[in-house]
Image (cartoon, grey):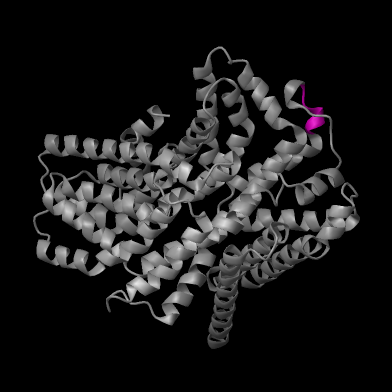
C-alpha cells in the first residue's frame, strides 16, 4: 500500500515537472518571439500557475490529515481554473466584439476562477491576501450601504464578475501581465545563475569580507544578502539561504543571537530594493509608470546602496563597542581559490545589466543572460551545467513563480474592485484632507503600505497601495517616480516591522532567539529605510 502511495506521488511529481518545464519553455518562447497576444497569454499563464499550484499540493498528500478530501478538493480547484480561463482563451474575439454583454458563462467562469484564485493564493501566499480580496468583493456587492465617501452607487453580482473577468484593470490586468511577461523569465534567469555557481561566488566573497574586517561575520551577512538578493528578491528565501551559515558565524564571533538574526533579516529584506530583481517590483513599477526598466533600476540603486551602507555602519559601531574582530579561522587561501573558481559565473548577470543600460528590452536582456549562463559556466568543470541542469533550471524557475503569480492574480481582484467602485477616489478624498500638510498624507500612506505588506508579498502590497494613493500624492506636487518608490519601500520593509515581521521571524528561528526581540532589532537596524523615503 505504501509503495502504491509512493508511486502515485512520483507520478504526480513527474507530471508537475513536465508541466513546469513546458510552461517555462512557452514563456521563454513568447518573450523571444511574442506570437501569443497578451490577452491570451495572461489567462494561459494563470492556468499554468493554477495547475502547478494544485499539483504541488497533491505531491504533499502524505503530510495531510485527510488525503482523500484534500485530493478531491485540489482536483476540483484545478478544474475551476481550467474552466475559468477557457472563455477568454477560446472566445476572446467574440467577447471583445460584444463588449458590455454579460453572458451567464462569463459570470460562471469568473466565479469559479475567483474561488480558485482565493484557494491557491491561501495555499501559496497565506491567508491575509485572499481575506482582503474577499472583503473587497463584499465591498463591491454591498458598499452602497456604507455612509459618506466610503459608499458607492451599488453593483450587481453579474456586473462585478464581468468587470473582474473582462476589464483590463481586473484579474487579467497589469499585475498578472507582469507575472506572465517578466516574472517567469527572471525566475528562470535566477535559477540558471544559481545553478551555475554564482551563489557560491557570493558566499566566497562574504567569507573574504568576514576574514578581513572588524565584525566581519555580520558584515559578510550584509554582503551575501545584498548579492544574493539581486537574484532572489524574496526576503524569507534570502534569510534561509544566507542565514544558514551567517547567523551561526555571527553568534560564534560574539554577536548576541537577536542582533545576529536582526542583521540577517534586515540585510535579506534589502534584496527587495536591490536591482536588478527588486522582488519583481521594478517590472510592475515600470509598467505602472510607463518608464523603462533601466530608469527604475537607476532610481533604486543609490537608496539601496545607502541602505546597506547604513547597516554596515551599525554593525561596525556595534563591533567596536563589543570588541568583536574579524573571523580568524577562515582559510583565506581556500576562499581566494573559491572566488577564482566561480568568478566567471558573474558574467551573465553583468551582461544582463549592461544590456539593459545599452537600451535593450528587459525580455531580450534576460534571454541573453539565460543563453549565456550555460555557455560561460562551461568554461570550468566545477560550474558546467548539464542538459538536466538546464531543464531543471527552467522547471524550477516556473515553479518558483507560482506564489508571486498567485499573489498577482489575487491583487488583480482587489485592484479591479477599486477601479469599479471608485474606492481609490474615496481614499484620495481622505488624503486630500491633508493636502496642506503633505507629511501627514505621506504618513497615512506609509501606514497603509506597512499594514498591507504584513500579510502579503511586497509587489501585491505596492500595487494595491499605489492604485489608491499614488495619484493623490502626485497631485500634491511630489515626483511620480518618487511617490512609487516611497510606496514600494514601505511595502517592502513591513518584513522587518513588528508585530508581523516575517523575515525577522525566519531569522529568529535560525538563531533560536525571541522573534519579537529580533523584530525590534531588525526594525532599528532598518530605521534608515523608514526615514529616507
> In this view of the protein, can residue 483 be seen by the observer?
yes
Question: Which residue is at the far top?
Answer: 436
Q: Is residue 76 left or right of residue 532?
A: right
Q: Residue placed at 63% from the left, 63% from the top?
A: 34
Labels in figure, total: 0
Q: Work out which quarter of the rendered image holds the N terminus and state it.
A: bottom right
Q: Is residue 254 left or right of residue 431?
A: left
Question: Which residue is at the far front?
Answer: 358
Q: Residue placed at 13% from the left, 34% from the top?
A: 321
Q: Is residue 527 above or below residue 413?
A: above
- Residue 440: x and y in percent read 52, 18
Q: Work out which quarter of the rendered image holds the C terminus and state it.
A: top left
- Residue 523: x and y in percent read 36, 35
In depth, the one of 57 and 442 nearer the eye is: 442
Name the magenta segment's main secondary structure.
helix
Q: Residue placed at 58% from the left, 39% from the top?
A: 289
- Residue 14: x and y in percent read 55, 80
- Residue 75: x and y in percent read 70, 70
In depth, the one of 159 and 512 nearer the eye is: 159
> In this view of the protein, can residue 331 be seen by the observer?
no
Q: Is residue 375 above or below residue 121?
A: below
In depth, the one of 455 and 268 nearer the eye is: 268
- Decide whether residue 461 is among the magenta residues: no
Q: Is residue 445 above or below residue 385?
A: above
- Magenta stretch, residue numbers: 143-147
Amino acid at each position: 500500500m505504501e509503495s502504491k502511495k509512493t508511486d502515485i506521488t512520483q507520478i504526480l511529481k513527474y507530471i508537475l515537472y513536465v508541466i513546469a518545464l513546458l510552461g517555462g519553455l512557452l514563456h521563454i518562447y513568447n518573450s523571444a518571439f511574442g506570437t501569443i497576444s497578451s490577452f491570451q497569454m495572461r489567462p494561459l499563464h494563470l492556468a499554468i500557475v493554477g495547475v502547478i499550484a494544485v499539483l504541488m499540493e497533491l505531491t504533499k498528500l502524505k503530510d495531510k490529515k485527510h488525503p482523500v478530501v484534500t485530493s478531491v478538493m485540489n482536483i476540483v480547484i484545478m478544474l475551476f481554473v481550467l474552466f475559468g480561463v477557457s472563455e477568454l482563451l477560446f472566445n476572446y474575439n467574440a467577447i471583445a466584439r460584444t463588449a458590455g454583454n454579460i453572458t451567464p458563462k462569463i459570470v460562471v467562469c469568473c466565479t469559479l476562477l475567483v474561488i480558485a484564485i482565493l484557494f491557491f493564493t491561501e495555499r501559496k501566499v497565506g491567508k491575509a491576501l485572499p481575506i482582503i480580496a474577499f472583503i473587497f468583493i463584499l465591498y463591491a456587492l454591498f458598499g452602497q450601504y456604507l455612509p459618506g465617501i466610503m459608499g458607492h452607487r451599488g453593483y450587481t453580482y453579474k456586473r462585478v464578475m464581468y468587470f473582474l473577468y473582462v476589464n483590463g484593470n481586473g484579474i487579467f490586468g497589469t499585475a498578472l501581465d507582469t507575472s506572465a511577461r517578466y516574472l517567469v523569465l527572471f525566475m528562470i534567469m535566477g535559477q540558471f545563475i544559481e545553478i551555475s555557481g554564482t551563489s557560491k561566488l557570493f558566499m566566497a566573497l562574504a567569507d573574504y569580507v568576514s576574514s578581513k574586517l572588524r565584525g566581519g561575520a555580520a558584515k559578510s551577512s550584509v554582503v551575501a544578502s545584498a548579492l544574493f538578493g539581486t537574484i532572489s528578491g524574496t526576503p524569507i528565501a534570502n534569510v534561509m539561504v544566507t542565514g544558514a551559515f551567517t547567523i551561526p558565524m555571527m553568534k560564534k564571533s560574539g554577536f548576541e543571537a537577536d542582533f545576529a538574526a536582526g542583521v540577517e533579516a534586515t540585510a535579506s529584506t534589502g534584496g527587495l530594493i536591490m536591482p536588478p530583481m527588486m522582488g519583481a517590483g521594478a517590472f510592475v513599477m515600470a509598467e505602472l509608470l510607463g518608464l523603462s526598466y533601466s530608469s527604475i533600476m537607476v532610481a533604486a540603486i543609490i537608496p539601496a546602496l545607502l541602505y546597506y551602507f547604513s547597516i554596515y555602519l551599525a554593525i561596525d559601531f556595534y563591533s567596536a563597542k563589543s570588541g568583536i574582530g574579524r573571523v580568524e579561522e577562515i582559510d583565506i587561501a581556500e576562499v581566494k581559490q573559491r572566488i577564482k573558481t566561480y568568478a566567471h559565473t558573474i558574467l551573465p548577470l553583468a551582461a544582463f545589466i549592461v544590456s539593459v543600460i545599452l537600451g535593450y528590452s528587459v525580455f531580450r536582456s534576460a534571454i541573453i543572460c539565460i543563453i549565456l549562463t550555460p555557455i560561460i559556466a562551461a568554461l570550468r568543470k566545477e560550474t558546467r551545467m548539464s542538459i538536466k541542469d538546464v531543464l531543471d533550471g527552467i522547471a524550477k524557475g516556473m515553479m518558483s513563480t507560482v506564489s508571486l503569480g498567485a499573489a498577482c492574480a489575487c491583487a488583480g481582484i482587489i485592484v479591479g474592485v477599486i477601479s469599479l467602485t471608485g474606492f481609490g477616489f474615496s481614499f484620495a478624498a481622505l488624503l486630500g484632507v491633508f493636502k496642506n500638510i503633505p507629511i501627514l498624507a505621506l504618513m497615512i500612506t506609509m501606514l497603509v503600505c506597512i499594514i498591507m505588506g504584513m500579510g502579503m508579498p511586497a509587489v501585491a502590497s505596492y500595487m494595491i497601495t499605489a492604485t489608491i494613493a499614488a495619484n493623490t500624492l502626485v497631485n500634491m506636487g511630489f515626483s511620480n517616480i518618487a511617490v512609487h518608490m516611497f510606496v514600494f519601500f514601505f511595502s517592502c520593509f513591513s518584513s522587518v516591522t513588528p508585530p508581523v515581521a516575517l523575515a525577522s521571524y525566519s531569522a529568529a528561528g535560525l538563531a533560536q532567539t525571541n522573534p519579537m526581540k529580533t523584530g525590534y532589532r531588525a526594525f532599528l537596524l532598518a530605521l534608515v529605510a523608514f526615514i529616507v523615503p
